[in-house]
Amino acid sequence: MDNLYLAIDGGGTKTDAVLFNSTGAIINRAVGMGTNPNGMSFDEVTLHFKKLFTNLLLTNSMKKIKGCFAGLSGSDHPELTRKLADCIQEACPLPIHHLIVGNDAMNALWSGTEGASGLVMIAGTGSIVFGIKDNGASFRIGGWGYLFGDEGSGYFIGREAIRHVLMTFDYREQTTSLTMALSNYFHVPVISDIVPIVYKCSKDIIAGLVPIISREAEQGDYLAKQILFDASRELVALLQSGIERFETTPHVVLAGGIWKCRIIRETICSAVSMPLIFPSCPPVYGSIAKCVNEWEKKDEKLLRSLKRQLLGK
């Protein structure tokens, strides 16, 4: 009988789940609401998982799930990990024989290393470095949030752009095309009018400035270029601090939306003298890889088949 497996990648805004079997078939995939307990109660987390599993498990012929790996944001503490595991077990209508809950950074790493050890730097709205050594020991660097960390992140870049354009309003810096670009983004006639808006908006709105800043930099705006180079330096320092934790050269994975920015991507690649992996698969593939490596004896043929399906090939 085919073994069923459940791979989950859960964040603050969405949760991605894939149901697959040991013959290499992806049975279904569903995306639901976020499941980070830092932003909701555990009852809400359970409810979100229930809705997700309702969309994922559409047939009554399934009896049990042999294994599940869930990489979830907000699972950094053992007590939180245990509670999240309880949420999944309670929400899932099928019994799960083996359940492992880990940090969502594990998925990001394994989506690039096929489940092997290494280092991942995730740079999106925030930034963090996470590593797993060959002996299984793990560590994290950064990720302390927008007030005290998240260097080089989307929020960092957006905040710096806002800070600089407000300085141009004070005639402390020269005005560039970035001022008009930000005025248009926030729909204000005068750049100083963004102040009450940015103090009330979410971090995602600030981080959403990155494509605008990238565009202006590509078109020659020197201030936009400087902001991106400053962010790149922060990311290089963060990455190097992680690499130094390894005794031998690790696999290095770069994940997150920041790497869509050509200037940052090329600056990092030229500053780090080792191969860098940009995953072609979404993070949930890292959870799939963990399941295969853990319960299907690292079957490479099985993993390749699942990867092709996930990429739609």
Image (spheres, rainbow, N blue to C red):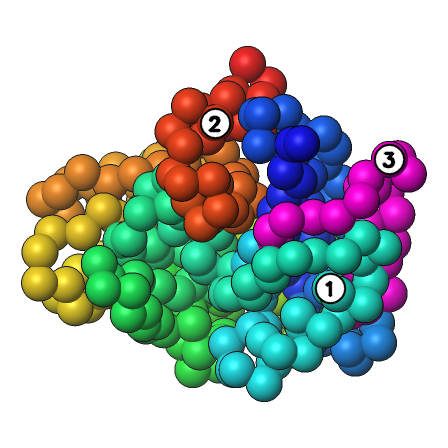
The residue stretch that appears in magenta: 45-68
Looking at this rendering, what residue extends furthest in the front direction?
A: 1
Counting every numbered tag in the picture gives 3
Q: On the rendered structure, is 204 left or right of 32?
A: left
The three-letter amino acid code for the residue at tag 1 is: Ile
Q: Are marks 1 and 3 in contact (CB under 8 Å)?
A: no
Q: Which residue is mark 3?
A: 61
CA gap, disc 1 to disc 2? 25 Å
Q: On the rendered structure, is 152 left or right of 9?
A: left
Kindly state the secondary structure of the residue where label 3 is placed: loop
The residue under the point 34% across, 54% down is: 120
Q: On the rendered structure, is 9 left or right of 283?
A: right
CA gap, disc 1 to disc 3? 20 Å
The residue under the point 66% across, 70% down is: 85
Q: Are marks 3 and 2 in contact (CB under 8 Å)?
A: no
Looking at the picture, tell me which residue is in the foreground, 7 or 282: 7
Residue 50 sits inside the magenta stretch: yes
Q: Is residue 117 visible?
A: yes
Q: Report x, y in % for residue 235.
A: 29, 59
Q: Is residue 188 visible?
A: no
Which of marks 3 and 1 precedes in the sequence?
3
Depth-wise, is mark 1 or mark 3 nearer the camera? Answer: 3
Q: Which residue is mark 1?
A: 88
Question: What is the number of the mark on residue 302?
Answer: 2
The three-letter amino acid code for the residue at tag 2 is: Leu
Which of marks 2 and 1 precedes in the sequence?
1
The residue under the point 43% across, 72% down is: 143
Q: Report x, y in % for residue 263.
A: 31, 40
